[in-house]
Amino acid sequence: MNITGDARLKALLLHVAGEKVHDIYDTLSAEGDKYADTKQKLSAYFTPKKNVQYQVYLFRKAVQEPGENLDTYHTRLRILAKNCEFTDTTAEIKTQIIQSCSSSRLRRKALREPDLTLEDILNHGRACELSEMQATGMETGSVATVNKLFHKTGHKNPSRGNWQPRKQPTNRCRNCGGNYPHDGDCPAKNKECKACGKLNHFARQCRSKPKETEYKHHTNKKRTQTPKSVYQITDSATGEKTGHTSSSDEAYVYVVKTDNTTKLPQTNVTMMGVQTLVLIDSGATANCISETTYNKLLPRPTLNQTDTKIYPYNSTDSLPVCGAFKCSVEKHEKKTMCTVFVIKAVSGQKHRSVADDLVESHPELFKGIGKLKDFQVKLHINTDIKPTCQPHRRVPFHLRQKVEDELRKLQADDIIEEVTGPTPWVSPIVTPPKPKDPDNVRICVDMRQANTAIERERHITPTIDDVIHELNGSTVFSKLDLRAGYHQLELHPDSRYITTFTTHLGLRRYKRLSFGISSAAEVFQNAIHQTLHGLKGVKNLSDDIIVYGTNQTEHDNNLRALFKRLKETGLTLNREKCEFNKTKLEFFGFIFSAGGVSADPKKVAAIQQAPNPKTPADIKSLLGMANYCSRFIKDFSSISEPLRKLTRQDTPWLWGPEQQTALQALKDNLTSETTMSYFYPSRQTELIVDASPVGLGAILCQKDKQRMKHIIAYASRSLSDVERRYSQTEKEALAIVWSCEHFHLYIYGHPFVLVTDHKALEIIWNNPRSKPPARIERWGLRLQPYNFKVEYRKGADNPADFMSRHPLPSHESESTRASKVAEEYVNFFSFHSTPKAMTLQEIKTETLKDPVLQEAINHVTNNTWHQIETSRNAETLKHFKHVRNELTASPASDILLRDTRIVIPTALHEKAIRLAHEGHQGIVKTKALLRTKVWFPDIDRKAEAAVRNCLACQANTPVTQNEPLKMSPLPEAPWHSVSADFYGPLPSGEYLLVITDDYSRYPVVEIVRSTSAVTVIPVMDKVFSMFGIPRVVKTDNGPPFNSDSFTQFAEYLGFHHRKITPLWPQANATAERFMRTLGKALRVAETQGIPWKQQLNIFLREYRSTPHSTTACSPAEVLFQRKMYTKLPSFSVTATKSSDAEVRTKDSNAKSKMKDSADAKRHATPHSLCPGDTVLHRQPKHNKLSSPYNTKPYKVTK
């Protein structure tokens, strides 16, 4: 062509390469028109970058597939080894074949003879395969007859051309074509024919095939071999279509003449692990695929040379055969080995897809701008905002005609309308040129002022994770674009006024939703989502609609349903932007395929061609762009670390070799095509996490049925300055919290395994009774919605370890917020755990001075507890080591927390206990109060000792210990010793003087008007005159009995006045017990309305004549030696003589029983006081605030 100029060579290269290569070239930063530079840039782009570690991983995972011969497997290993950079490739391939070949005979031989070379192993393997195939053929009697169909020649039939099908033998079933009769049911029973759709026969036996189908056979008289027919194989969007195989030297390709309505027999099979759509014909004798289809097979099988010739229809020239290979073909869990021929082209008519038929049968969907039926958008306008009429922005004269044309077009499409009359809102317009049509302008309304009055609606917009989950398992994709999407939604008449805009032709306003409205995106997304609701395999993001299916049939059904829905709702599509029947589809910035999700090559190319950053802002921009692809790149954080350092404020700008290496590594890794697997909710999910001193890392993976792990996504982020000062346990816990929330959409609502290399976390999270540190306890609340089990694995086995050590640059607001929440939680407990009289600053100051606490903080931060044995504070530090999983250190190392409690330095221990005991609570409550706020070693022992030594508490704590009862002996004779006491005052203001004989329990009750000695002495003198003067009178220490008058009275009558122990009423038990009985009798009289004085006499009469529980005799009988008359009938009252010995025996026995019962009930124990002990003396209680004991200590002398 004699073209020598660089510019012309460059233009010719791009023209020949095609439009797609031209688009890719536009994204590359090639400067100038030099042909060599252009060629070098394109070569660098299309040359696959390799990740050696990943290539080695693929090599190690390569096993011999079922039906794959050894040569094919060897070739596949040879191809995989090219990118592994092995020192000895032959030795590595030999080892891999021995480990992963399917022949146990070959493996045993290689292990028996370790000196065998690779070539020896291959030769032996070929011999094993050949002998196995021949033996199988001899045993089954099917040698050279499999997949072979003979045809009779020489018989002509005008309606069939030169070929006549052979007649079926009489022993062949006419429904399935197999041997007849069958041992059981016919294999074709209830099976659908792929040709006619009817039941109970196979397509090869179908007698209802379209008459338009003509089979023509090409004959060549020079050939002596019987030719074989090959049904046409064509490519589709989802894969390959194949027929059957043969081992003959010649084969023929036939053409199926069909119109658009003919239904061809086809089905989906799995070839080399790839789902493939094939055409079926029982007369075919070979399987053919095109070279294009062959190149799509991964891994690509090795082609073997073949002498077989394949002839197309009505031609004497054979098709160029690239070669043949053997592979397994699977359908409905059944497999067969087939020989497949690869040809450079396939002649014949291309089969029309369902998408083509739908586009042709629905022309109305591709005309004009549609309008969603029965739907109007009503904007929510805040009437409190004052409307604004902005001034008109004049349009340049040379653009006015273009603006007028665009306005007329919009008005003709019913998108805008003229405005007449006053309007409160007016916005100006701007007229930029259209990106793909610079000769025309786009009218954009500046709605910034109007948007202040438009309230946004909140609707859920799908994320990339939602899309990936929905497309799980899909193999066929289509993408449809709504034409002028927003303009297909009609605005409600009441909402149109706010869209009014000014032009040089006058005022206009929108009748449809416009792009400038702030809530338009959410409204449009929700409207289209609701319109498509209920359709399977259909999802929209804004005006892009994706259709997907696990196979071609499912995809076509979903597409057909979508077209029907669009027709019903009045929406239209942009045919130029629609893509149908794609095995790979760009959507939402990612590439979706049957294998999973990968990064968009355009974005990868943009990063690869990015120039060196000049400022920290350039680095942030580059990392932000690269972060979009980070889910596909393992260890991405390690590459970004040197670059991220330059973005810190305290780091000077210095672009050196380390940064240049990191940037180049970043470009190389982003260029390698890594495909992530789809997420399957039914599979077992693992979340592998790790934390390093600089960052967090996580890997989400799943296990398939063969227990093979598949990576779903990588994630990592760097730690903030505050987070880097956390203890290692807290960093590992933070990694768990962050990774769970990061992958929330994948793991929420389903159990999963959380893998960590930190043993302490397994104990904390798997044990509900564990007491984690304050931060971890706070984070534990955020993990409550997740159902997981923590599993410990060593750091060497944790793939997230490297990612955490080289993290991604975290989003500043995210890390700052999370760190701030944790720090606020720690600060909250630090402040509220501090006793109010002890300031937080005082604790910080003493903590910094305390060598034990500083050493403990160092161990918490660096996780060096194994070193405490060498410390001189080892004994004290052991207390901290036992609770190390509960300790948290502040970033400044001036506060140490145990869970939510502050650790008090040694100098403040006594002060903390004193403050906790300030309210003089008991030992249990003082310790409980301390435990809720603070902690320090031996806190319980020190608190108990302090409370026991508190003099104020001892003086005001009544002793609950009861001494055993000491029973008083019975007096020498009746009325020898009496007890006196008062009962009252009564409602009348009077008192009762009660005198009781201690021997007979006989009571005497006298009514007195006061308790003074002047009143009491005459009454007692009267009683003593009647019963005699007792030897002992026992009273309490009341005023009348402590007076000089009563002392003189006692001396006058000659009795001994015995006053009981003060504040010890049990000493006068006889009188006190009678008072209870007397009081009940008087209260009963009051209840029954009987005068109490009358009831008193009745009570005394009954009481004196009733046998006493202690003596078993009535008081009157013991005192007077006779029984009293009562109202109850009796024969006679005779004098009785109660024996003194009998009374004493009964009294002693009764008192002994009472003592044993009382001592047991009161848990009485003897005191343990000894001479020299210090005690407190009980004192009278003058008021409610008087202490039971005198605070002055006394010493026991005897």
Image (tube, rainbow, N blue to C red):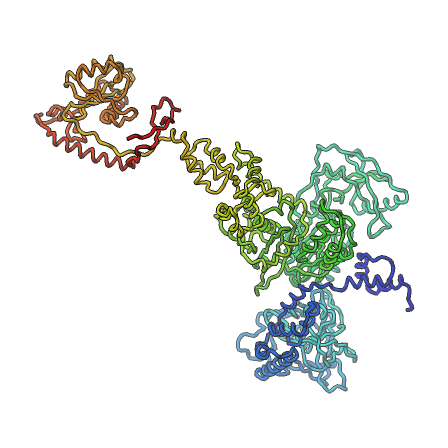
Relative horizontal placement of residue 190, taking residue 531 as reference (left or right)? left
Q: Tell me the quadrant of the picture where the C terminus can be found.
A: top left
Q: Residue 300 appears in which quarter of the rendering?
A: bottom right
Image coords of residue 694 (percent x, y): 64, 51
Horizontal arrangement in the rendering, residue 754 relative to residue 1186 (left or right): right
* Residue 249: x %, y % from top left: 71, 82
Position in image of residue 900 (x %, y %): 53, 41
The answer to whether residue 262 of the structure is visible from this angle is no
Residue nearest the viewer, comparing 820 with 187: 820
Q: Is residue 1158 above or below residue 16?
A: above
Q: Nearer the viewer, residue 750 or 871?
A: 871
Residue 52: percent from left, percent from top? 69, 64
| Front position in the image: 109 or 20 | 109
In the rendered image, the residue lying farthest to the top is: 1014
Whether residue 544 sits left or right of residue 860 in the image: it is: right
Along the horizontal axis of the image, is 1099 left or right of 507?
A: left
Q: How many marks?
A: 0
Location of the N terminus (image quadrant) = bottom right
Residue visible at 71% across and 33% down in the picture: 383
At a point 58% along the width and 35% down the height, the residue shown is: 841
Q: Which picture quadrant has residue 820?
A: top right
Q: Is residue 762 visible?
A: yes
